[in-house]
Each structure stands twice: as C-alpha cells, then as structure tokens.
Image: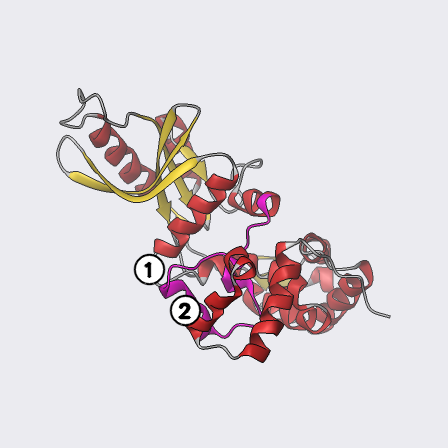
C-alpha cells in the first residue's frame, strides 16, 4: 500500500489521509538534512497501518531523528515540549513573557489588578510604545484539546471588569489597550469568530497565519528546556520548579543544571545539545 493512501487518526479523533509531504516539511523545519528527512520518511511509511494515531507516527519519527541529531530532534519536538511545561500553567506564562520580551515588550508576570467587581491576577502584562496589553495564557498539557469559545468569553469578561475597575481615575493606573488570549493548542471556529468580533488578539499554535505561537518560537530561537533530549523528565521538572524555563538560561549559566543534581560529565553533554539548539544549528546529514 502506498503510504499516502493510509488513513491515520489525529489527536482530536478525526481521521485523515497520511501526508508524506507534511511529515517531510516538519522534519525540514527542524533543521534536518535532506538525506535524513528522506530516510526518516521512508522508515515511517514502511511502518504505517490503517488508523495509526498521529501520536505514534510522531514518536516513531522523533526516535529515528534522535539517532541522527539530538538538537534537531529537540527542535522537532517543540510542540510536545511546550505541553511538558506543566503540570501548572506558570512555566508557560513565563515562557510567553520571554517570547514577548524578545519582541520588544516590557513584561510583568502574575500581577494583581483591581477590577470593578473583583481583583484579578493577570498572567502577563505587556507594554510596548505606551500601550498595555492584558494577556491570558491558556495552557494545555495534551494534544487534541481545542480552545473553545468559552475561553475568549471568559477573557473578554475579565478584560471589561478590569477596564471598569474601581481605581479607573487613579493617575498611576495601568490602562489596558487590548486583551490577548494565548494558547499552545488551536482555537475552535466559534472561538476565533467571537474573539475577533470582541476585539481580542488571539494567538494559538498555528493561529494567526503570521504571528502564531509556532512562528514566534521559530523567529526568536527561544526554546523551552523541555526540548532537550539529554534531560530526564524528572530533571526537567526540577528545573521548572526552580523557575527555569528556557534552554538559553542553561546555556548562559550551566551551574543551574546542578539544581537538578546532574553530574559534571552529563552537564557537558547537555550543554553540547543546548548550545547547538540555542545557536539554531542544523543537521549536516550522514554519510
């Protein structure tokens, strides 16, 4: 059977025809060399079966890619790595703040502000060119979860309550220009329709076509430490618990790895992968 004739199952449960081209494009975006892309794609196609979950296809491709280049595999797993920024949503909030800082914003995380009815803890307050943005971060830890219309409805209600706050006349009050909703998954059609109509700025994994979360990550080169294949899940969590989110933080201060009780020999290996990832290195292929 031709690989492109196989029906696979997405994380949402929807079935679709496997696309070798999409797989190859995702591998190329991670920096894999053409010959590696061809080898991985051929191996994946040889193991396809009807109804195969996309999660298994990803794991197979990731495992094969990891054999050729760890830092390229690290970039390939970026979407999953974002989902590993749990279990709380705080590391995701800090990560979004770092992406915004890289784009020229001044940011504050977890600030309490007065609303007309109640106080609100704002995930991220971002300021640029004398305009302030109230940003709500909606983190999901698993694939297939959609950000439904309930979320932008909730964000809009909070934004309006803050705008009508009891200290509205105070000279030092932050006056927000716009509410934002940022998620690491995708939006439902109704969520996009309502958010756009209400004047919210929506950022999802692949939304909008320019300025999506995926675009921001690729453009900035700021990768979460959860990308690193050389770290165990427990070590990643220990670092996250110490408020360390970026691979860049480790590259600039290797001693941070000692917080996860990592030995010196392994620190060198982790840094080797981390530095290649931070520098945007690509795979040179295999002989």
Residue 25 on image: x %, y %? 71, 53
- Furthest toward the right, the residue is 287
Q: Of callouts 1 and 2, which one flags the residue occurring earlier in the amino acid sequence?
A: 1
Is residue 60 or residue 263 the one in the foreground? 263
Name the element at disc 1: loop
From which residue to which does the magenta span run? Answer: 220-247
The answer to whether residue 17 is visible is no
The picture quadrant where one finds residue 133 is top left
Residue 70 vertical position relative to residue 93 in the rendered view, above or below:
below
The picture quadrant where one finds residue 166 is top left
Q: Residue at x 67, y 56 (%)?
A: 30
- Residue indicated by mark 1: 88
Q: Which mark is residue 133?
A: none
- Residue indicated by mark 2: 237
Quadrant in the picture for the N terminus? bottom right
Mark 1: few, some, or many residues within 10 Å (few <14, many ≥20)? few
Residue 242 on image: x %, y %? 37, 63
Residue 62 on image: x %, y %? 63, 68
């Amino acid at each position: 059977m031709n690989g492109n004739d196989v029906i696979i199952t997405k994380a949402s449960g929807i079935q679709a025809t496997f696309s070798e081209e999409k797989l190859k494009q995702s591998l190329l975006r991670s920096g894999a060399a053409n010959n590696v892309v061809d080898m991985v794609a051929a191996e994946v196609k040889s193991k396809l079966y009807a109804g195969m979950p996309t999660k298994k296809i990803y794991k197979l491709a990731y495992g094969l890619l990891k054999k050729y280049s760890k830092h390229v595999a690290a970039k390939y797993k970026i979407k999953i790595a974002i989902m590993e920024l749990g279990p709380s949503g705080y590391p995701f909030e800090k990560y979004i703040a770092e992406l915004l800082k890289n784009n020229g914003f001044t940011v504050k995380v977890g600030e309490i502000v007065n609303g007309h009815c109640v106080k609100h803890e704002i995930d991220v307050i971002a300021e640029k060119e004398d305009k302030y943005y109230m940003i709500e971060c909606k983190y999901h830890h698993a694939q297939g979860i959609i950000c439904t219309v309930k979320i932008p409805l909730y964000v809009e209600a909070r934004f309006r309550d803050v705008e009508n706050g009891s200290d509205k006349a105070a000279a030092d009050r932050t006056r927000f220009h716009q509410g934002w909703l940022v998620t690491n998954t995708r939006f439902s059609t109704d969520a996009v329709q309502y958010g756009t109509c209400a004047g919210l700025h929506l950022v999802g994994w692949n939304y909008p076509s320019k300025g999506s979360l995926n675009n921001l990550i690729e453009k900035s080169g700021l990768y979460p430490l959860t990308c690193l294949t050389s770290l165990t899940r427990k070590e990643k969590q220990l670092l996250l618990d110490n408020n360390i989110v970026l691979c860049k933080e480790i590259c600039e201060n290797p001693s941070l790895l000692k917080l996860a009780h990592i030995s010196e020999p392994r620190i060198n290996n982790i840094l080797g992968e981390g530095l290649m990832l931070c520098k945007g290195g690509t795979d040179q292929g295999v002989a």
